[in-house]
Image (cartoon, rainbow, N blue to C red):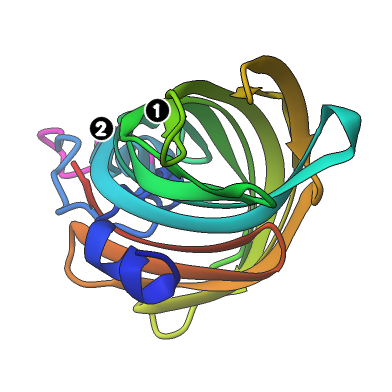
Amino acid sequence: MSGPRGAARWLLALVLGQASLWVAAPARACGVSASGVASCSLAEHAEEVRPHWASGVSGLYTSTRLRFDGSLDADQTRYAALAALAYLPTAALVLQAGVGVALGGSLTLPDGKHEFSPGPTGSLGVDWRAWDDGRFFLLLSAVLSASFAHTELPGAAQASYSALDLRIGGQFGIDVAGVLRPYAVARAFGGPVFWQYQGEDVSGTDAHHYQLGAGLGVRLSRHLNAFVEGIPLGEQALSLGVGLAF
């Protein structure tokens, strides 16, 4: 099963740290002195009531082209689901870790379609809200990820597959009525892929080291948010997810 329609069946989502920044927590008083004057500053109050943690689930479908040793090219599709936990040490900084599973996909070469088995995947990331004036925002991010699986071609033995990836990107968008956040996204990335092809160890990398696309964040409630993102240029991708801040 391949394509965005197949991806939608497999994918449920973890919101990255940015979703947690869209949530407003219920107000809690800093404390009031006997004279009726607040015992903390407005900045201290905002720090107390903002969310400090976020969690969620996310799903991802990608389609790209890999280039291996010896001018060996392969068209790759993959599906993955990820769960993550994020910590917000400040209102502008998000630290996150995720674990999940790559659910399937394939590598297509002249000798046929090498199907992926399910395998583990994980990530570590940081988001920084570089600018937010209440209407426009700029979010910068860096994510290091790794995935492991096997491929199988009918009539051939299984082959191990592993990939490492570091991607750095930015999202620039606008807040619409405190509910919708459409944004444009650009990312650059790179990392090695290690595989066994016809009994030989080969290494490669993505033919496209960038992503250009757009997304939409939606505030569903005081604590709950969702997003969908489509990438038509570079490494093509479709992702969607939900997240909870607390």
Q: Secondary structure at mark 1?
A: strand
Q: CA distance from mark 1 to mark 2?
A: 47 Å
Q: Residue at x 55, y 31 (%)?
A: 126
In the image, residue 37 lies in the stretch drawn in magenta: yes
The image quadrant where one finds the N terminus is bottom left
Q: Between residue 1 and residue 120, name the one nearer to us.
A: 1
- Of labels 1 and 2, earlier in sequence is 2
- Residue flagged by tag 1: what amino acid is it? Thr
Q: Is residue 225 visible?
A: yes
Q: Residue furthest right?
A: 71
The image quarter containing residue 136 is bottom right
Q: Is residue 85 visible?
A: no
Q: Residue at x 34, y 28 (%)?
A: 119
Magenta stretch in the rendered image: 33-41
Q: Residue furthest bottom?
A: 177
Vertical comparison of 73 with 120: above or below = below
Q: Secondary structure at mark 2?
A: loop
Vertical comparison of 204 with 32: above or below = above
| Horizontal arrangement in the rendering, residue 171 relative to residue 24 (left or right) | right
Q: Position of residue 199 (x, y in %)?
A: 62, 17
Q: List the residue tagged with mark 2.
A: 39
Q: Position of residue 142 (x, y in %)?
A: 63, 34
Vertical comparison of 61 with 215: above or below = above
Q: Between residue 80 and residue 48, name the one nearer to us.
A: 80
Vertical comparison of 199 with 244: above or below = above
Q: Between residue 195 and residue 89, name the one nearer to us.
A: 195
Q: Residue at x 71, y 39 (%)?
A: 168
Q: List the residue tagged with mark 1.
A: 121
Q: Position of residue 150 (x, y in %)?
A: 42, 27
The image quarter containing residue 144 is top right
